[in-house]
Image (spheres, grey):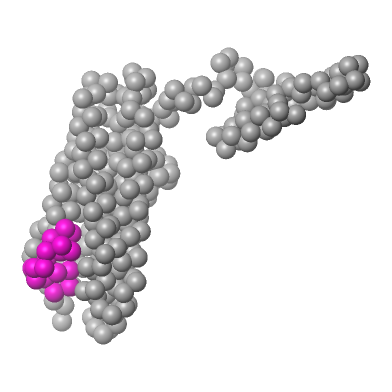
C-alpha cells in the first residue's frame, strides 16, 4: 500500500521525467557547459529521479537505511543545482548586456557565487553520509548546518545580483528580458524552499522532519516550489534564441588587434626556420646571445599562460 509521502515521490517521478528531456533538449540546443545553465537542471532532474526512486524502493525494503540516506542526500543537494541554474540565467542576461553596451558586470562575480553553492552542496553530502548512527544525526550534523548557511549566503548574493541586473534593464537585448523575469520569479519562490530546509535543520519541530514530518507541509514548502522553478526556467528557455558568445575586455586584450590573425599564425609556422636561422647567425656574428624572438599568443587561456611564462623565462637568459 502506497502512503502519502510515497505518493509524492511518484508525483515527482512523473514530473521530472519530461523535465529531464526538456533540459537535455536545451543542452543540445544551447550547449552542455556549466555556463549555459541547462546542465544544472539536468543534474537536478536526475537527483530528483534517483532520490525518489530510492525512496520508492523502501516499499519493498523498509529496513534498508542506505535507501533513506540516498533519498536524503539527493533531497539536500537539490538547492545547489537550482541556485546554479538561476545564476547561469543571470550570467546569460549579463552577457546580453555586454553584447549590447559593452559595460556588463564582471563574469567572475557569477563564478564566485556559484563556487559558494558548490561548497555548500559538498558539505551537505559529507554531513549526510558521514554519520552511520542514525538518519537524524546525519541530517542535523554540523556539516549539513554549515552547508545550509552557505546556501543562505548564495541565495542572498543571487538576490543582490538580480537587483544589480535590473538596474541595467535597458541594456538587455530584445528577447532576453523574459529570462530576467523568470529568474526573478524563481528566486522569490526558491526562498520558501530554502526556509523549509532551514526549519528542518535548525528548528526541532516534528512538522519539518524530512522522514516523519507533515507531508502536506513538505508538499507546499518543498516539492511544489522546486517543480514551479524548474518549469518556469525550462519553458522560458524554450523561447530563447541562440546568441553569440559575449566578449569582455579581458578577452579583447588577449585577441589579435588586426583581422588577419589566421594569416599571422600561418606565417609564424612558415617562418620558424628563418627565425631560427637568423638567431644562429646573430650568435655567430656577435659572439654573444642574440635576443630570441618572443612566442606569439595563440590557443586558449592555459596556452596563453604557458607562453607568457616561457617568454619571461627566456627573457631572463
Of the pair 287 and 133, the residue shown nearer to us: 287
Q: Quadrant of residue 69?
A: bottom left
* Residue 200 in magenta stretch: yes
Q: How many marks?
A: 0
- 315 left or right, relative to 277: left
Q: Quadrant of residue 101?
A: top left
Confirm whether residue 23 shows in the render: no
Q: Quadrant of residue 171?
A: top left
Residue 291 percent location from the top left of the image = 77, 21
Residue at (27, 51) in percent of width and height: 150
For this orientation, the residue located farthest to the top is 258
Can you say whether 198 is above or below 176 in the image?
below
Tell me the quadrant of the picture where the N terminus can be found: bottom left
Residue 301 percent location from the top left of the image = 55, 34
Can you say whether 25 is above or below 221 in the image?
above
Residue at (20, 28) in percent of width and height: 166
Of the pair 95 and 2, the residue shown nearer to us: 95
Residue at (16, 77) in percent of width and height: 2
Confirm whether residue 247 shows in the render: yes
Can you say whether 267 is above or below 21 in the image?
above
Residue 50 percent location from the top left of the image = 32, 66
Of the pair 193 and 261, the residue shown nearer to us: 193
* Residue 250 in magenta stretch: no
- 208 left or right, relative to 90: left
Tell me the quadrant of the picture where the C terminus can be found: top right
- Which residues fall within the magenta stretch? 197-213
Can you say whether 56 is above or below 143 in the image?
below
Residue 281 percent location from the top left of the image = 89, 19
Residue at (24, 23) in percent of width and height: 168
Amino acid at each position: 500500500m502506497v502512503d502519502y509521502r510515497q505518493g509524492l515521490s511518484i508525483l515527482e517521478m512523473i514530473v521530472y521525467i519530461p523535465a529531464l528531456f526538456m533540459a537535455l533538449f536545451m543542452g543540445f540546443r544551447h550547449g552542455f557547459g556549466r555556463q549555459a545553465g541547462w546542465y544544472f537542471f539536468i543534474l537536478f532532474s536526475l537527483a530528483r529521479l534517483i532520490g525518489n526512486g530510492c525512496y520508492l524502493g523502501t516499499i519493498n525494503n523498509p529496513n534498508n537505511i542506505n535507501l533513506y540516506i540516498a533519498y536524503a542526500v539527493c533531497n539536500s543537494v537539490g538547492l545547489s543545482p537550482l541556485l546554479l541554474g538561476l545564476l547561469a540565467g543571470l550570467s546569460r542576461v549579463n552577457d546580453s548586456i555586454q553584447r549590447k553596451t559593452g559595460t556588463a558586470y564582471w563574469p567572475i562575480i557569477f563564478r564566485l557565487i556559484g563556487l559558494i553553492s558548490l561548497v555548500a552542496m559538498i558539505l551537505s553530502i559529507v554531513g549526510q553520509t558521514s554519520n552511520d548512527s542514525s538518519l537524524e544525526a546525519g541530517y542535523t550534523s554540523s556539516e549539513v548546518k554549515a552547508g545550509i548557511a552557505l546556501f543562505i549566503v548564495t541565495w542572498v548574493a543571487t538576490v543582490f545580483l538580480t537587483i544589480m541586473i535590473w538596474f541595467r534593464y535597458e541594456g538587455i537585448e530584445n528577447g532576453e528580458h523574459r529570462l530576467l523575469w523568470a529568474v526573478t520569479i524563481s528566486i522569490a519562490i526558491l526562498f520558501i524552499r530554502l526556509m523549509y530546509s532551514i526549519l528542518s535543520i535548525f528548528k526541532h519541530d516534528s512538522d519539518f522532519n524530512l522522514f516523519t514530518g507533515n507531508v502536506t507541509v513538505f508538499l507546499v514548502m518543498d516539492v511544489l516550489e522546486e517543480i514551479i522553478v524548474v518549469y518556469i526556467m525550462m519553458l522560458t528557455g524554450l523561447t530563447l534564441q541562440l546568441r553569440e558568445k559575449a566578449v569582455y575586455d579581458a578577452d579583447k586584450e588577449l585577441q589579435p588587434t588586426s583581422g588577419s590573425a589566421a594569416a599571422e599564425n600561418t606565417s609564424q609556422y612558415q617562418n620558424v626556420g628563418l627565425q631560427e636561422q637568423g638567431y644562429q647567425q646573430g650568435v655567430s656574428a656577435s659572439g654573444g646571445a642574440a635576443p630570441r624572438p618572443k612566442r606569439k599568443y595563440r590557443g586558449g587561456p592555459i596556452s596563453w599562460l604557458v607562453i607568457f611564462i616561457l617568454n619571461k623565462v627566456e627573457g631572463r637568459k
